Image: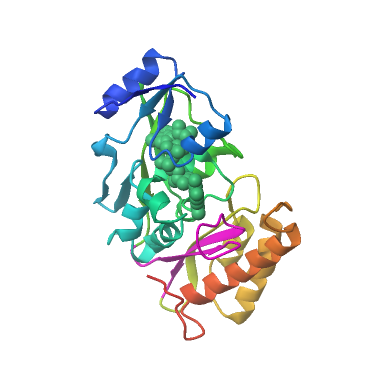
Amino acid sequence: MRFQTLTPRTACEALELLRENRGELLPVAGGTNVLVDLRRGKVAPQVLVDLSRLEEWREIRFTGDMLEIGGLVTHADLAASPLLMGPFAALRMAARVVGGPQIRNRGTLAGNLQSASPAADAVSPLLALNAVLTLVSAEGSREVKVAEFFLGPGKTLLKPTELISKVTIRANPGGKSIFYKCGKRNALAISVVNLAAYLELNPEGRCTGSGIALGAVAPTPVRAKRVESYLLQQKIDDTVIAQAQELVDSDICPISDIRAEASYRRQLAKVLAGRALYALAGLGGNNYGVG
Ligand SMILES: Cc1cc2nc3c(=O)[nH]c(=O)nc-3n(C[C@H](O)[C@H](O)[C@H](O)COP(=O)(O)OP(=O)(O)OC[C@H]3O[C@@H](n4cnc5c(N)ncnc54)[C@H](O)[C@@H]3O)c2cc1C
């Protein structure tokens, strides 16, 4: 395995390198997926572009009412950020359960997105929160909704000369979100199913906005659109939650694989949806760590 590594100091330099080489270089951020792919022979680039020095893409900040997260922000940065509270809590909760400490210290949000695993943990919160990705190239930039970014397992609509520079989320400060992950063990486990839910409730407890997304139950992470439509204007109670759980079934199409049977995933998705709605609605005297 022989390759050269180029280490640009600025985003402009990195994008210029990709443009000059017509995208034949492989970008690497934390390298947690790229190194595995290199060892397995899944990729064999002659040149890697190491993005890890691009400090300008490492920031988490509010600009007005928008939360902006640089593409190179790591899972550890997300897990520790005081900005990821209330409506954004699901992303912090997801970041806390990605891999182990080493993976969280190196692995980045952009790398998680571009790897396009159906089970990627950071993606469900971004989907539930209607996040928008900024894709940049030497020619310019474009914005893409995270819901439109994934084409299938390992496939996205990123062009070879583009990079993910940032993720932007707008959410109502009164909204709350939560994330649950079920794996085969408590640490260093790929999700068997994960679920992120976002809810806005009016003072009477009626739902005025929602986002529910699941991972590892379809070829790409998916929104539970039928559940979301059903919840709108409902007063969240036991009956509504039970009906929402039934509807989850029609929004997903899980497969059986080495980690779980499809029927188990269906059951798990319902359980996680119920738990999330109870927690976000503040029912049952247990807020399940909603932050
Ligand atoms: C042991 C282990 C455990 C893991 N556990 C989990 C887990 O629990 N949950 C989970 O979701 N994932 C897990 N992962 C997967 C991985 O760690 C994450 O997806 C991580 O976020 C990838 O980020 P990275 O920066 O390391 O990506 P890299 O490996 O650097 O890159 C991955 C892909 O993204 C591209 N890329 C990187 N940065 C950019 C950018 N800015 N713009 C465009 N493309 C870019 C690369 O070219 C490559 O195609 C695990 C991996 C390992 C090895």
On whether residue 240 falls in the magenta region, the answer is no
Residue occupying the point 47% across, 73% down = 280
Question: In the picture, which quadrant includes the C terminus?
Answer: bottom left
Q: Is residue 219 visible?
A: yes
Q: Nearer the viewer, residue 125 or 116?
A: 116
Reply above or below: 146 against 122: above
Which region is colored magenta? 173-202
What percent of the width, then of the height, locates residue 26? 44, 26
Q: Is residue 277 left or right of residue 262?
A: left
Q: Nearer the viewer, residue 56 or 137?
A: 56
What percent of the width, then of the height, locates residue 49? 37, 26
Q: Nearer the viewer, residue 156 or 197?
A: 156
Toward the bottom, the furthest residue is 285
Q: Is residue 143 visible?
A: no
Residue occupying the point 49% across, 24% down = 1
What percent of the width, then of the height, locates residue 258? 70, 52
Reply above or below: 267 against 262: below
Reply above or below: 96 against 29: below
Q: Quadrant of residue 267?
A: bottom right
Residue occupying the point 30% across, 26% down = 7
Q: Nearer the viewer, residue 208 or 129?
A: 129
On whether residue 186 falls in the magenta region, the answer is yes
